[in-house]
Amino acid sequence: MDSAKARKILEKVRSGELAVEEALDGFRMEPVQSLGFATIDTHRGIRNGFPEVVFGQGKTREHLLGICQSILERRERLLVTRVAADVAEFVREALPQLDYHPVARCLTHDMPVESESDYPGFVGIVTAGTSDIPVAEEASLTLRMMGHRTELRHDLGVAGIHRILGAHQWLLKAHVLIVVAGMEAALPSVVAGLTEKPLIGVPTSVGYGTHFGGITSLLGMLNSCGSGVTVVNIDNGFGAGYAAAQIHRLTKVSPHE
């Protein structure tokens, strides 16, 4: 259950559409559910605004299937990140209602319609190179699952500086920006110098030998001369998308405020 569902239940009680005892049934579930191999945080949506997201990498097929089944039984929105294609195929044989997004490597269920978003504007996502697209797609998918609109622009790295300069007007329209880059990861510094918008940098593991699997990009972003550049972990598109959603959520005032 998330805060939106909890609010709907309470509104129905207030209007008389739902009896108090019936409403209580929706809140009586334990805050956690033990599956033996996993403990599902069933109340995370109420606390944090979005249900528990499942990290698929490293889990057995059977364990991942069990976790997905448990979440779906509660009729919650589901996002599973870092799922290999063969594992996704195994899970979808039992749960065909799930959608697999091969570029982002994610499984989803009950994705909101972007045109019906409650939040104004969009979160802009920029990649320095085409090789950075999978990480950007993970960020975009996370935002869309959380009810936010996204727009993506690819291959705007500093090796051809005119490309990002040509997107200046688009950058100004975005409410929040995510910049995904490998190699020396100079792009976030450039974008930060072109706009006042909150900017989240995502270093990727794209690069040659002394790139050290993304450490060079990470250190480059952490040492950015661009003011206000916030950095997530290497290849962490999910973390960037979630953080951008938390920032963009502030553009919408909750009904109880």
Image: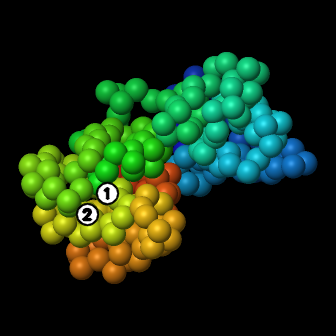
Which residue corresponds to mark 1? Answer: 179
Residue 219 drawn at (x, y percent): 41, 77
* Foreground label between 1 and 2: 2
Position of residue 249 relative to residue 190, above or below, is above
- Nearer to the camera, 44 or 155: 155
Q: Amino acid at mark 2?
A: Leu
Q: Do residues under tags 1 and 2 come within 8 Å of each other at their CB atoms?
A: yes
Image location of residue 213, percent across then percent down: 51, 66
Q: Which residue is located at x 29 percent, y 77 percent?
A: 224
- On the question of residue 159 being in view, the answer is yes
Q: Residue at x 36, y 56 (%)?
A: 180
Position of residue 163 measured from the top left corner of the image (x, y, whole percent): 14, 51
User: Horizontally, is 94 left or right of 193 in the view?
Assistant: right
For the question of whether residue 239 can be seen, the reply is no
- Which residue is label 2 attached to? 187
Looking at the image, is mark 1 or mark 2 earlier in the sequence? 1
- In the picture, the quarter occupied by the N terminus is top right
Q: Nearer the viewer, residue 15 or 161?
A: 161
- Residue type of the residue flagged with mark 1: Val
Q: Secondary structure at mark 2?
A: helix
* Label 2 packing within 10 angstroms: few (<14), some (14-19), many (20+): many
Up/down of 225 relative to 10, above or below: below
Relative depth, front residue between 128 and 13: 128
Place of residue 181 in the rendered image (x, y in percent of width and height, measured from the top left):
35, 59
Q: Which residue sits at x=63%, y=20%?
A: 97
Q: Residue 251 — which label? A: none
